[in-house]
Image (cartoon, coloured by chain):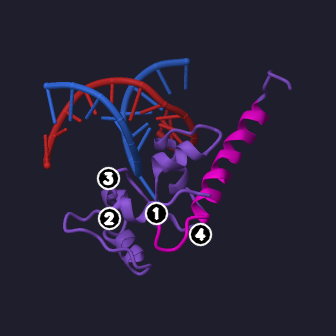
Chain colours: A purple, B blue, C red
DNA sequence: CCATTGACGAAGA
DNA sequence: TTCTTCGCCAATG
């Protein structure tokens, strides 16, 4: 196994990491969620939770991004200025997820681990 | 190359 | 319990 790396290799790994994030997200069942930190742990590349968020931000259409929430069970998308408020919650509620009064969901109930 | 900015998260105050 | 601070790492100017 070669240790030396050229630009192409690194670029390839970056794209591969993005691909991995998308794959994990696509495996989350309807009505279940994962946190950014969970995805970070599951991935071999050890991408930081922060980087995971960025990858999902750049995910292709059809990716169930709404099933990824923060460690508190809240919708991080609501923090973005140019993003429809409440969209993530609405999409999740359509899948049967119920939110608590404080706007978060119960991870004890909805958290899912790939198996 | 350096500074700044996030769809994060854990630990302190 | 709420608010800060800091580490994290990809992307952007």
Q: Residues within 10 Å of mark 2 (few under 14, many from 20)?
A: many
SS for dot 3:
loop
Which residue sits at x=37%, y=59%? A108
- Which residue occupies 46% across, 66% down? A66
Q: Are marks 4 and 3 in contact (CB under 8 Å)?
A: no
**Which numbered disc, 1 or 4, marks the residue that appears first in the sequence?**
1
Residue A105: image tag: 2
Nearer-N-terminus badge (3/1): 1
Q: Secondary structure at mark 2?
A: loop
Question: Can you identify the residue that label 3 sits on?
Answer: A72
Residue to which mark 1 is pinned: A33
Counting other residues with Cα less than 10 Å from the Cα at mark 3, is it few (<14), some (14-19), or many (20 or more)? few
Pointer 2 with pointer 1, Cβ within 8 A: yes
Discs 4, 2: same chain: yes
> Which residue range is magenta in the image?
A7-33
Query: Horizontally, is A78 left or right of A52 in the view?
Result: left
**Quarter of the figure with residue A69:** bottom left
């Amino acid at each position: 196994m070669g240790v030396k790396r050229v630009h192409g290799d690194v670029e390839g790994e970056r794209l591969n990491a993005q691909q991995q994030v998308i794959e994990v997200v696509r495996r989350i069942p309807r009505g279940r969620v994962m946190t950014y930190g969970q995805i970070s742990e599951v991935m071999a590349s050890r991408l930081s939770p922060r980087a995971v968020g960025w990858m999902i931000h750049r995910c292709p259409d059809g990716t169930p991004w709404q099933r990824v929430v923060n460690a508190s069970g809240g919708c991080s998308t609501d923090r973005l200025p140019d993003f429809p408020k409440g969209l993530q919650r609405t999409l999740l509620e359509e899948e049967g997820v119920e939110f608590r009064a404080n706007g978060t969901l119960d991870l004890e109930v909805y958290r899912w681990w790939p198996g």
